[in-house]
Amino acid sequence: NAGVMQNPRHLVRRRGQEARLRCSPMKGHSHVYWYRQLPEEGLKFMVYLQKENIIDESGMPKERFSAEFPKEGPSILRIQQVVRGDSAAYFCASSPPSTDPLGETQYFGPGTRLLVL
Amino acid sequence: AQSVTQLGSHVSVSEGALVLLRCNYSSSVPPYLFWYVQYPNQGLQLLLKYTSAATLVKGINGFEAEFKKSETSFHLTKPSAHMSDAAEYFCAVGGYQKVTFGIGTKLQVIP
């Protein structure tokens, strides 16, 4: 069973461009989480999605950031008009269907390291 | 609301010495508690988790953690540090529709 896949692993963008980060959850997992990690700042929750639904986006910046998890295909984190402050590692995690997903182990991908020039 | 406080962003221990990484949480619902480890340039992986069963939880690589409700703590310990334990460790609490991670503690193991 393949783990959580993220691509690309490294992404370089110039200010003003768009960044698209992809996450394929583990087989059978229907919950996806996105986190941002900045040096010395730990892991910050961004958004929690289930198939075709955003459950909690309280950690997402109000502008330029969006996320989706379509019925088919990977989850996408999209950052429009990137700025230097968006440079960070973005991690995706997935967990299986559960009546209580917050007690489930989250399985993390290797991350996408975004550098904005 | 919920939060996690990890005391000490950097901890150094000698090889063979006790490892103690501190975590205190705040949650007004019965919490789920986790410890994850992150090696350089990798994602996080689960060390252990507490889900209201036994208060002493054993994890992988010889780590264990004890849930103490009266102290709102979930400290991570290992009796004898190994060089391969050098990594960053994250405590997390689950509840209120999301899992909240602490800021992380970088463990350095000195030969």
Image (cartoon, coloured by chain):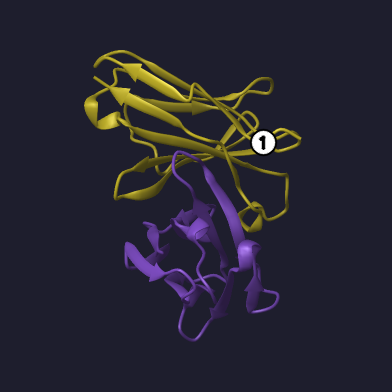
Which residue is nearer to you in this view: B56 or B1?
Answer: B56
> Foreground: A77 or A54?
A77
Check disc 1 and report the residue beneath it. Answer: A3
- Where is B40 relative to B2, above or below? above
From the viewer's perspective, is A40 left or right of B44?
left
**Callout 1 amino acid:** Gly
Left or right: residue A57 compared with residue A116: right
The colour of chain B is purple
Measuring from the top left, give residue A87's x and y in whole percent.
30, 30
Regarding residue B95, the answer to whether it shows in the image is: no
Q: Residue B70's spot in the image, x, y percent?
A: 49, 86
The answer for which chain carries disc 1 is A
Q: Is residue A117 left or right of residue A95?
A: left
Number of marks: 1
| Residue A50 sits above or below residue A116 on the image | below
Q: Residues within 10 Å of mark 1 (few under 14, many from 20)?
A: some
Q: Secondary structure at mark 1?
A: loop
Residue at position x 44%, y 43% in the image: B40
- Residue furthest bottom in the image: B70
Q: As displayed, is residue A39 above or below residue B11?
A: above
Task: Identify the residue at horizontal 49%, vertical 73% (top origin).
Answer: B16
Asked whether A109 or A103 is in front, the reply is: A109
Q: In yellow, which chain?
A: A
| Residue B102, image x, y percentages | 41, 59
Residue B107: image quadrant is: bottom left
Q: Residue furthest front?
A: B111
The quadrant in which the N terminus of chain B is found is: bottom left
* Residue sitting at x 35%, y 67%: B12
Q: Is residue A7 visible?
A: yes
